[in-house]
Structures are given as structure tokens and as C-alpha cells.
Image (cartoon, grey):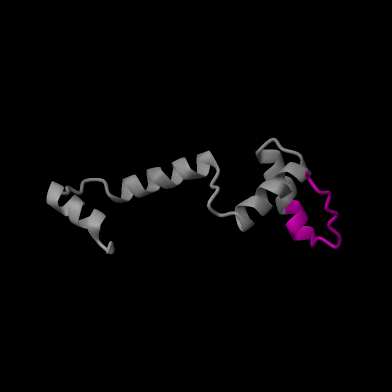
Amino acid sequence: MPTTLTLKNIPDAVYERLKAAAESHRRSLNSEAIVCLEAALMPGKMPPLERLARARELRGALAGQQFAAADIEAMKQAGRP
């Protein structure tokens, strides 16, 4: 069951950033705060758009590189017992 949390004495700069983020994501302040807390405390759960942006960044970093099948297999096995 969800729990209610009240935050006090939030620094003005933090509040303004949260408010701006909520507006840009079309969320309420409460929803944006929950998303921020989940991102900080449950890092395995990455928002889909962030995951897509990261994948594109990684793909761009590898652009133009060629890997032989043997190289790929060696990379997959590296560090495995």
C-alpha cells in the first residue's frame, strides 16, 4: 500500500529544478518526486527514453568499428569462469 511522505525545508534551488522537471515531463510535483526517488534508489529501473538515449550514445561510439565473430565470442566469454 502506498505511503504518504511530507517533505519540509526543501532548498529553493531543488524545488525549482523539481518543478521545472515536472513541467517538462508533464507530471505533477508529487509524480516527479516519486520518479526521481525511484531513479536514485532503484537504479536498475531505467526510464525507457533514458535507456534508448544511452543505447544510441553507445552505438554512436562504436560507429565504424568492425568486429570479427571470434572477437565477439571472446568478449562474451571474458571474465566468465
The N terminus sits in image quarter: top right
Q: In the figure, is residue 8 to the left or right of 21?
A: right
Residue 14 shown in magenta: yes
Give the main secondary structure, helix, strand or loop, of the magenta stretch.
Answer: loop
Q: Is residue 13 left or right of residue 69?
A: right
Q: Is residue 16 visible?
A: yes
Outermost residue on the top side: it is 26
Query: Residue at the location (86% across, 60% down)?
Result: 8
Residue 34 at x, y percent in the picture: 71, 48
Task: Give the image location of residue 6, x and y in percent.
Answer: 86, 54
Residue 73 or residue 59, whichever sits in front: 73
Instruction: From this view, report whether residue 64 is shown above or below residue 8.
Output: above
Q: Which residue: 26% across, 46% down?
A: 63
Region rendered in magenta:
1-16
Q: Is residue 62 a member of the stretch shown in magenta?
A: no
Q: Quadrant of residue 74?
A: bottom left
The answer to whether one can see residue 68 in this image is no
Residue 26 in the image, given as x and y percentages of width and height: 69, 35
| Residue at the spot 61% in from the left edge and 52% down from the top edge | 39
Can you say which quadrant of the picture contains the C terminus?
bottom left
